[in-house]
Image (cartoon, helix red, strand yellow):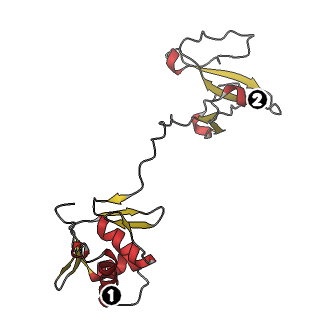
Amino acid sequence: MTNLRTLAASPSAAPATVGSSAVVPTGVPAAVGAAHRHRLRAVAPDEVPPVAELLHSGATWLPAPPHTVPNLPGQPPMVGYLVLVPAEQPAPEAPTAATHGDALVRIDPEQRTARVADRLLDLTYLEFELLAHLVAHPHRVHTRDQLVTTVWGYGHVGDGRTVDVHVARLRRKMGAEHRASIVTVRRVGYKYAPPIGF
């Protein structure tokens, strides 16, 4: 049995003639235009074709489903292959600063540092996570339960009092002049509200 590997022909390629390495099979309707014409190369069953020379460097080829390969009367069944060529990749963007926040509080999640008015804070893991979450959503009120779920995780056993203790520690570490940026919303929770001057 003969295996055929199908490669899309370039629009400018002339039809192959009998005797060359590419053969246009008989029985292919003439209505098929040049844009849909394929080059077929006959390959012996035990021959390994020079695929690396024929395909894009990142291409992958795999057997085509049998219903997609035409059956030609009086000819042995054909085996088709699909060629998957990766899309053009856009040029990588220049790395941007990983920090986020505002002029008062700057959070760097990669280095896990937080600065308040350019002063580095010495924070525990949960204090950092709590401050980073509040700063990422300025002026948004978070209930204690939301903060426990988001910062501590679903498996945490505790209550809103845990949040109160961590907020008190954060305020202390931020200093007297900036502690008011974490606002208590009575009977609801907390929000980060940077001062107007920053």
Locate residue 64, reporting x and y percent.
62, 38
- The image shows residue 23 at horizontal and vertical percentages of 68, 16
What type is the residue that disc 1 sits on? Answer: Val
Q: Residues within 10 Å of mark 1 (few under 14, many from 20)?
A: few
Residue displayed at 25% across by 76% down: 179
Left or right side of 32 for 183: left
Where disc 1 sits, the SS reads helix
Q: Quadrant of the C terminus?
A: bottom left
Name the residue rendered at 62%, 39% in the picture: 66
Q: From this viewpoint, is residue 32 visible?
A: no
Classify residue 56 by image quadrant. Answer: top right
Would you place residue 114 above or below residue 151 in this image? above
Q: From the viewer's perspective, is 39 left or right of 138? A: right
Quick one: 168 or 71, which is closer to the camera? 168
Label 2: which secondary element: loop
Asked if 198 appears above or below 39 in the picture, the reply is below
* Residue at the (30%, 84%) spot, across then down: 168
Location of the N terminus by quadrant is: top right
User: Circle 1 sits on which residue?
Assistant: 165
Of labels 2 and 1, the one closer to you: 1
Name the residue tied to disc 2: 49
Depth check, front residue: 65 or 7: 7
Quarter of image, res 79: top right
How many labels sit on residues? 2
The kind of residue tagged 2 is Pro
